[in-house]
Image (spheres, rainbow, N blue to C red):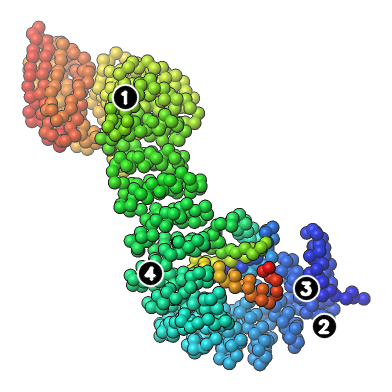
Amino acid sequence: MVAPSLKLQDLIEEIRGAKTQAQEREVIQKECAHIRASFRDGDPVHRHRQLAKLLYVHMLGYPAHFGQMECLKLIASSRFTDKRVGYLGAMLLLDERHDAHLLITNSIKNDLSQGIQPVQGLALCTLSTMGSAEMCRDLAPEVEKLLLQPSPYVRKKAILTAVHMIRKVPELSSVFLPPCVHLLHERHHGILLGTITLITELCERSPAALRHFRKVVPQLVQILRTLVTTGYSTEHSISGVSDPFLQVGGHSSKTMTNTSPLSSTQVATNTDTSRNAGNAVLFETVLTIMDIRSAAGLRVLAVNILGRFLLNSDRNIRYVALTSLLRLVQSDHSAVQRHRPTVVDCLQETDASLSRRALELSLALVNSSNVRAMMQELQAFLESCPPDLRADCASGILLAAERFAPTKRWHIDTILHVLTTAGTHVRDDAVANLTQLIGGAQELHAYSVRRLYNALAEDISQQPLVQVAAWCIGEYGDLLLEGNCEEIEPLQVDEEEVLALLEKVLQSHMSLPATRGYALTALMKLSTRLQGDNNRIRQVVSIYRSCLDVELQQRAVEYDTLFRKYDHMRAAILEKMPLVERDGPQADEEAKESKAAAQLSEAAPAPTEPQASQLLDLLDLLDGASGDAQHPPPLDPSPGGALVYLLDLPCAPPPPAPIPDLKVFEREGVQLNLSFIRPPENPALLLITATATNSSEGDVTDFICQAAVPKSLQLQLQAPSGNTVPARGGLPITQLFRILNPNKAPLRLKLRLTYNHFHQSVQEIFEVNNLPVESWQ
Amino acid sequence: MIKFFLMVNKQGQTRLSKYYEHVDINKRTLLETEVIKSCLSRSNEQCSFIEYKDFKLIYRQYAALFIVVGVNDTENEMAIYEFIHNFVEVLDEYFSRVVS
């Protein structure tokens, strides 16, 4: 006894009545069992009802594959209700991956050739939904015949089927090409819409079709024009705009054929924009104009339409306008500039996608004339924008500032502002850029160091800002304390305050290790710049000698050694850094120290420490390794004899063409030789080593050498290695001269020697002639 | 080209899904949850177009039901927006009281 089967509506009510997921599953499983039993029994009367229930269950997401064969049976039956459900089932349950679908090909063929329109409609729908390539090939001729049928109902379905077929089997395009032109002459909108889609599809697939349809373009234009100018047609208008979909379709197919539509202007002026449909049409016009190579006037029209969109209160429209303007800004920059104020207003939007688009567009619109105003707006936006946009905004502002900065001071101000507001979100090289910028702007040193000091005093949490500020204070600390700077109100800064601030940075737990490094080095630099005594600094440095961070510890140890053993060198080593090349390697504290270390070892102070052998071993180890020379463990003085060897140390890269030595003085066996070094990383610098040798029988004592150079050059004399040259080729005295020649002025050198030789005091003053040209060029 | 058409209720249950390009079954559920999450988290003032992976999502809310259409880049978003409304109106014609 089979229980009477439920009607579909009853089943739905039952399922709806289930309170929980589990209950629903129970109901459905029970029903499925019924359905399966009924299929097995082969009850023809209620088959369609069972299948309908099965389809509902399938829509809810449950497995329903056992109904596939039933679909076939239903399609084959002659009753319309059966066929209807059968085709529906075929569309939902069958697809290319199941072999069963080929079985319905025959049924579809029969149905297509019958005269009954609804049946044909059903078959066509099914074919267009799930037709596979083989089915399409088989049934193409049938579909083509149907294209020419008088009834519009069938024709439009046939056209859509043709679209699907072309997508699946591109070779069929040749079959469907000829009817298209005919179809365009139709009045029925459904057919026209379908035809336009078909043409678009054809044109996308093959350029030959494109050429074919170019002839058809006037026809399309005619259609559009009639649509726009004729009045209200109840059948096809959506809120007052006659068939917007057809208009949209018409535009997009014209895009394919690349013509200049005068009708665009007509559409633009006639379309009613108060409803969204009208806006959709206008937008499509804009897209068309953008896609094809239209005249300048049309492009301006497009931009103006987009500008109007921007003023609309509907967010969707504004979003669309901003996106399209972004595409246009590359080509029509000036036209888009006119709408700049509106774009900037959009920055204030609460909607995240809108404000992101507005930000991108604003950044693209910045140019040299409006940079100040735009920067102000963008900076205000930076302060209030959501965190995910901050990084983009900050880097955008920095880039734009770099490209368009009117003055250096403005540039520094802008970067400073960005660092204080969004410091944690800037890119890593912002610090390097800023230091390089400040270093280059000599007249602004005082100003920038003051601003940075104030900013640092307020807030030490923003790491990039702290790093830059520490570096500046270290470099230009003397300017900070001078107290007079015209551009900013005078600020009386105490030495103690500066030191206290740097110490605070050092000790703060918010500081990164890199920041700490900057602060420590700044403190060291200040030891030469400040007038007071250095006890406080020495204390801090010695505290950090036992810091856990290896980097800091290393620095502290070096600096401490600098205080203790090489105090006389400190000024030279810690003087102001020369300007860094933009693309060159980052000359940070490390590089400076490496150069300082090289000079330290070259200018040999009194050889008190008998660690020559140890150093020579080290030199062997360091052979070829350039990086290690940066931190030679405790900087020991080198014996004078190894001077020439040291000049070849890898840390001071060998000069490309060594300048020949020059003998400048000879008297009774006492000789003075000059050797020249031009370090490649600093072309303005010249290092002269004067070597005094004695080949006579008597000692030379109290040897003093002094030098003078023209005013445009700067000279620095290091301490000599000694003042006694023993007789008969004893240990020579060496002394290093450092000459800075930034203007490449010709080098002239005057020397004064005084010494005691053979119990006589000798004094010689002479100018060095024939100095090699390479020494100053 | 339209890639998919979804109707989802406010609780996140899919009421209708139609895919015009083949997507695996398990990928479908994943896609649907992500899409629903992004649509449900939007407020009323935000615009109806979202960018999701390489699709654009255009959604419209009718009482407790969201209709979401995923398209590729070549489509006119405003036209699709209108199309969704057209679809709902057609349903309303055939089966009354769809949109109260």
Q: Check disc 3 and report the residue beneath it.
A: A53
Contact? badges 1 and 4 (CB < 8 Å): no
Which of marks 4 and 2 precedes in the sequence? 2
Q: Check disc 1 and report the residue beneath it.
A: A481
> Please, what secondary structure does the residue beneath circle 4 have?
helix
- Which of A332/A746 is in front? A332
Which chain letter goes with mark 4?
A: A
| Residue A662 visible at all | no
> Please, what secondary structure does the residue beneath circle 2 have?
loop
- How far is disc 2 from disc 3 in space, using C-alphas? 14 Å
Query: On the rendered structure, is A605 left or right of A247?
Result: left
Which of marks 2 and 1 precedes in the sequence? 2
The kind of residue tagged 1 is Leu
Which chain letter goes with mark 2?
A: A
Q: Tag on residue B75?
A: none
**Residue at horizontal 37 percent and vertical 33 percent from the top:** A452
- Which of A460/A702 is in front? A460
Work out whether B48 lies above or below A550: below
Q: Are marks 1 and 2 in one subunit?
A: yes
On-image quarter of the C terminus of chain A? top left
